[in-house]
Amino acid sequence: QSALTQPASVSGSPGQSITISCTGTSSDVGGYNYVSWYQQHPGKAPKLMIYDVSKRPSGVSNRFSGSKSGNTASLTISGLQAEDEADYYCSSYTSSSTWVFGGGTKLTVL
Amino acid sequence: QITLKESGPTLVKPTQTLTLTCTFSGFSLSTSGVGVGWIRQPPGKALEWLALIYWNDDKRYSPSLKSRLTITKDTSKNQVVLTMTNMDPVDTATYYCARSDTIFGVAEYYFDYWGQGTLVTVSS
């Protein structure tokens, strides 16, 4: 299975909105509503931000939202804040009953 | 409070077998639907899913690493063990264990709690 495709980097100014895409295939992203997103600050463990495409765990800001269209999932962060600067990874369950992660996207808050 | 913690050697030699232990608290691996997985991250690189074991001993492995991985659990000790054979310098990474949640006894497909990770370096 190949890693899901994410842009290497995105950037935005405080208060703006950004969207990170995550492209897979019909065997993973397109085939299941089991896409999750993780935030990782330098030297820290990943943190679950979105699961099942668009659900937010308790405690995660409603500035984070997820969606999916076909084989591409997206994470949108609105009202960008300095603390949002981090690496973001998508993940999907697959038709092989395994998981696959994306290559990661570095978010810079200008 | 749910916590997970990885333990094992920080340095292994090429061709050796790596054994990592994930010790967790705050949940039980005997609860229907619960799973514990392993994910690694080479320095400066992306996350890579390795393996997962469910409450019922169902095991899943990364297709590309399946021949080298074994995952087991000790429910009484709240531990999950991952072994990886024939270690190579490219296996140098931080290894994380993480919980896969359950809702009403049905397995979920995301990792909601993660350990702090343990850095394993492969070098002679």
Image (cartoon, rainbow, N blue to C red):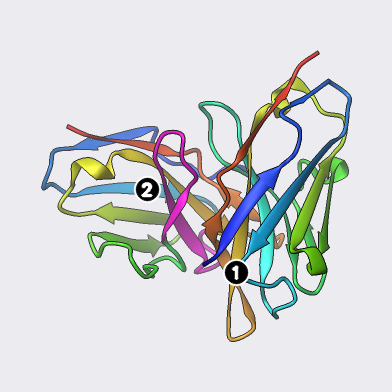
For the point 28% across and 54% down, which residue is it? Answer: A76
For the point 11% across and 47% down, which residue is it? Answer: A15
For the point 61% across and 65% down, which residue is it? Answer: B100
Subunit under mark 1: B
Q: In this rendering, would B123 be left or right of A106? A: right
User: Can you tell which of label 1 and label 2 is closer to the viewer?
Assistant: 1
Q: Which residues are magenta?
A: A28-49
Amino acid bearing label 1: Gly
Residue A49 picture quarter: bottom left
Task: Decide whether residue A66 is among the magenta residues.
Answer: no
Q: Is residue A33 above or below residue B51?
A: below
Identify the residue position indicated by label 1 in the image: B26
- Label 1: how many Cα within 10 Å (few below 14, some 14–19, many 20+): few
Residue B12's x, y, as percent?
A: 80, 25
Residue A34's x, y, as percent?
A: 52, 66
For the point 76% across and 16% down, which residue is it? Answer: B123
Identify the residue position indicated by label 2 in the image: A21
List the single residue furthest toward the left: A15
